[in-house]
Structures are given as structure tokens and as C-alpha cells.
Image (cartoon, helix red, strand yellow):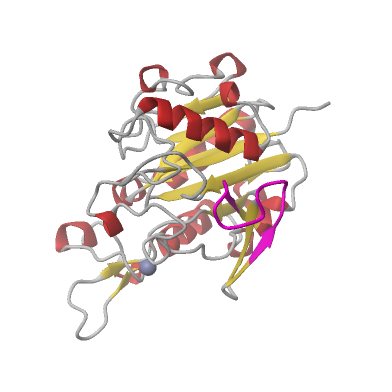
Amino acid sequence: MAVRWDGGTGRQGDRGTGGSGGGDGVRLWQSSLLSGFGELTHGVSLRTGGVGAAPFDSLNVALHVGDDTADVRENRRRVAEEWGGDLRDWVCAQQVHGNRVHHVTTAEKGRGALSYETAIPATDALVTDAPGVVLALFVADCVPVFLYDPQHRALGLAHAGWRSLAAGIVPKTVETMQARFGTRADQLAVAVGPSLGQCCFEVGPEVAEQFDSSHLVRRPGRGKPHLDPYSVVRHQLVACGMPPARLAALPPCTKCRQADYFSHRGSAGTTGRAVALLALLQAR
Ligand SMILES: [Zn+2]
């Protein structure tokens, strides 16, 4: 089933899509903004409905975190089934918290879908305009950023932890879409998936100094500053020329909602990953 996020108001509406209908099956978070585009499919997996044992319980879909490979493949198969696509269409990356963007072609379908070794090396953002290619990146607290250019039917998906945010992965993804597909930033629709919120994103001085103070929240008596990654993404997109209203509402915080989401910080670093998926439907 899909968990449709309306953000802002804090409401989370459930919309059945043939899943279990309860809280224990495979579930996908979706943005209401992007759900408005009928030619697009997207989502982020929640952590329930899988076969994994602690600390990967239960729907870990990442092959690089020490989980059992057979369990991960089964979980990916379940997510693909709930999502309504084929796992062999996924294109995954070996994510390194950098800012490299890769243009995915139809010929690359299946890279990283069943083994880590075949994933696209050293890459944290994927773009494509090929219908049927499923962009797939893995997250647990890091910010999944979904970009859609409805004019040129082009997609971008970025994995943005603080290092990648500071290294400009969001504007680099926009620039790559501009260069490859003719995308105009003022026509983009963008959603940010479930990720570590400002509420839980405490940072040390070496991280804080990478960002403008307008993105840091300091409260008396709270000690270290907190980084607001949503504010960083919004600021960077607006600087690219995107109207602020084209960014979807603030997503849920993964650390605050660990019953639903894997959180790297919430689990002292050993946990599973969700998958962020983005694709253009193939014309039938
Ligand atoms: Zn939080």
C-alpha cells in the first residue's frame, strides 16, 4: 500500500493499492505533489513487510550493509511487486556521498538490481528520460531528492547526505538535466523523501561551517546546532531558478519515526536502507 504524504499539516493519508491494508505489509511513501503526474511513478519503501532479522528488520533493500543477500533480494522483489514494476528494470548506484551525476540509458537496466558489483560506481545522483528505466537509490536518514521535468519528461534522483548537499549535488543534478534534456529549472517539480529532519540533525562545527547560518538552527540550552537539510535543498533549487511553490512539503523525519523508517542515527549506524524509486511509465 502507498502512504501518501501531504506534509505541511502533518497529515499522512493511507491509500490502499492492493497491499495488505495494514501496517505490517510492504508500504511505500509517496509525495502528493509527484502523484499528480500520471506518467510518473515514485516512492520510498518503509521498513515493514520484509524478511530481514534485526538490525535489518525487516525490509532492508541494500546489499552493502552486511545483511543476508538472499533476504535483500527477496525484499527487493517484494518492493518491486508492490511498486508495480520489474526488479530487472532498476538501476542502482554505488553511493559514496559525493556529487557525481550519471545519465542512465535503457541499455543499463538491471545494473545493481541483483548484485552490488554491477551498480554504477561512485555515483550519488541518476538522471534519465528513458521510459521504463527505474532509478533506485538507497537511504537511511540521507535525503532522497526527486526531480521531475514534465515538459521534457525527464527525471532526476539524488542521494543527499550532508557531504553531498555541501558538494552541491542538487544543483549539479539540475544542471545535468538542463544539459542533457533541455530542462528549465522553473518548470521542475521536486519532492524530498523521508529523511533526517532538523529536529534530529545535530552537527559538529566541522559540518556546520559547510553551510550558511540560515540553514542552521541554534536554540539556547540545546548545545550543538542542528542542520535543516530541507532548507538547504529549497535554497539551492530556488537559486537554480525553481519557484519555491514547486517544492513539495516537508517530509517525515526518519529518526522520529523509526517504527516506519530505517534511521542511521537512530540505530548507532547499523541498520537497513530504504529504496527511493523514480520512473516514467512506458507507453502502452
Ligand atoms: Zn526528528
* Residue, far right: 284
Q: Quadrant of ligand 1?
A: bottom left
Q: Nearer the viewer, residue 16 or 112?
A: 16
Residue 57: % across, % down: 39, 46
Residue occupying the point 61% across, 60% down: 243
Residue occupying the point 58% across, 59% down: 247
34 relative to 140 in the view: left or right? right
Residue 138, located in which quarter of the rendered image? top left
Q: Is residue 4 magenta?
A: no
Residue 87, located in which quarter of the rendered image? top right
155 relative to 270 in the view: left or right? right
Residue 169, located in which quarter of the rendered image? top left
Image quadrant occupied by the C terminus: top right
* Residue, far bottom: 220
* Residue, far top: 107
Against 247, is 123 above or below?
above
Residue stretch rendered in magenta on the structure: 13-29
Q: Nearer the viewer, residue 242 or 2?
A: 2
Residue occupying the point 31% across, 40% down: 97
Secondary structure character of the magenta stretch overall: loop
Q: Is residue 23 magenta?
A: yes
Total labels drawn = 0
Residue 230: % across, % down: 44, 62
Against 48, is 126 above or below?
above
Q: Is residue 178 visible?
A: no
Residue 128: % across, % down: 59, 29
Residue 82: % across, % down: 64, 40
162 relative to 108 in the view: left or right? left
Q: Is residue 213 visible?
A: yes
